[in-house]
Image (cartoon, rainbow, N blue to C red):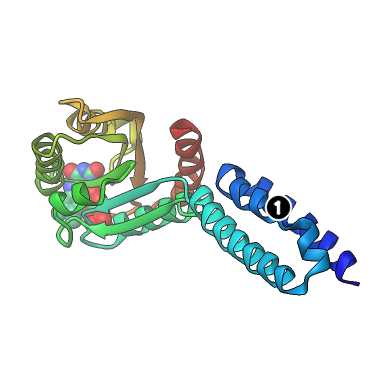
Amino acid sequence: MVGVSYVFLLKITLIRALNNEMKSNQLFMLNQRFRFTNILFPPFFLVSLIVNIYISYESKINCIQRVILMKIWILHNTTYGNGKKVAETLGDVLGKKNDVKIEHIKNVSPEEVVKDAPDAIIVGAFIRAFMLSGASKRWVRNLKSSLKKSNKAIKYGATFLTHAMPDNMASGWGKRFNKTLQRGNVITNVYPEWLSGRVAKPEGPLSEGVLETITAKGADLIEWMK
Ligand SMILES: Cc1cc2nc3c(=O)[nH]c(=O)nc-3n(C[C@H](O)[C@H](O)[C@H](O)COP(=O)(O)O)c2cc1C
């Protein structure tokens, strides 16, 4: 009975050790050393059980670390809620396997974001009276100075805009905002496209199909970041 249980336990150990790669290997070897004593002497069986539980705990931690691939901040500067919707839709896609934080630029300083050392940053802005929101541009500039000061970089960056003009007309503002993010090279790779959150009326709602396109672009962003 003890022998059968032990073989079963050993199998589990093997699977878990393989799952957990190197770290658990040492524990597995340790467990192996007790192999015969375990069968003959029940207290060692208990030791084996404890080792197994520990490996299981370690594997879980490792799995969580492997599943959460990146830390991503999504910042918006919404007035009427459209930018927030775009940010949340992106967050839904990116957040499936990553740690995503969404905030209004008023509520989080660039310094706080830099301190958090994200892998990627996505910043939103709006166009009003044919101008890009100054607050978003300032936030990005302050982020870059803060990164430079602390001698850090963010690996990936992307932008989105909310606007009422057709996409091709808003494109110039989008490209310029992308350049603002790119200049200085502290955000190492900037997604070549800006994402469009076009509104149907000046205060919203978002035009038909916008959130579906944002979802698709979010999936593409993940692929691009790989
Ligand atoms: C007073 C006013 C001026 C606007 N001017 C423009 C404009 O010049 N070009 C444009 O594409 N959209 C314009 N819009 C639409 C805004 O881009 C839109 O309200 C905003 O992007 C919505 O985003 P939010 O809900 O996140 O604040 C204007 C909206 C308002 C209320």
Question: Does dot 1 land on a helix, a strand or a loop?
Answer: helix
Using the image, determine if residue 175 lies above or below residue 138: above
Closer-to-camera residue (45/209)? 45
Residue 73: % across, % down: 31, 50
* x then y, percent, for residue 125: 22, 46
The answer to whether residue 53 is seen in the rendering is yes
User: How far across and down, in percent of the image, does residue 183 sit?
Assistant: 17, 26
**What amino acid type should be assigned to the residue bearing mark 1?**
Arg
Front residue (pair 210, 18): 18
- Quarter placement of the N terminus: bottom right
Image height check: is 214 above or below 156? below
| Quadrant assignment, res 109 | bottom left
| Residue at 68% from the left image edge and 54% from the top image edge | 16
Q: Is residue 62 above or below residue 216?
A: below
Q: 204 and 175: which one is in front? A: 175
Relative to 1, say whether 153 is above or below.
above
In-front residue for pair 211/182: 182
Local packing at callout 1 (Cα closer than 10 Å; few below 14, some 14-19, many 20+) is: few
Q: Is residue 204 visible?
A: no
Residue marked by disc 1: 33
Q: Residue visible at 37% across and 53% down?
A: 86
Is the residue marked 1 within 8 Å of ligand 1, measured from its CB? no
| Residue 63 percent across, percent down from the top left | 56, 53
Which residue does the image show at 66% across and 51% down from the upper left? Answer: 28
Q: How many marks?
A: 1
> Horizontal placement of 71 versus 7: left or right?
left
Does 99 sit left or right of 81 as displayed?
Answer: right
Residue drawn at the location 21% of the way across and 54% of the way down: 77
Instruction: Say left or right for 184 vs 61.
Output: left
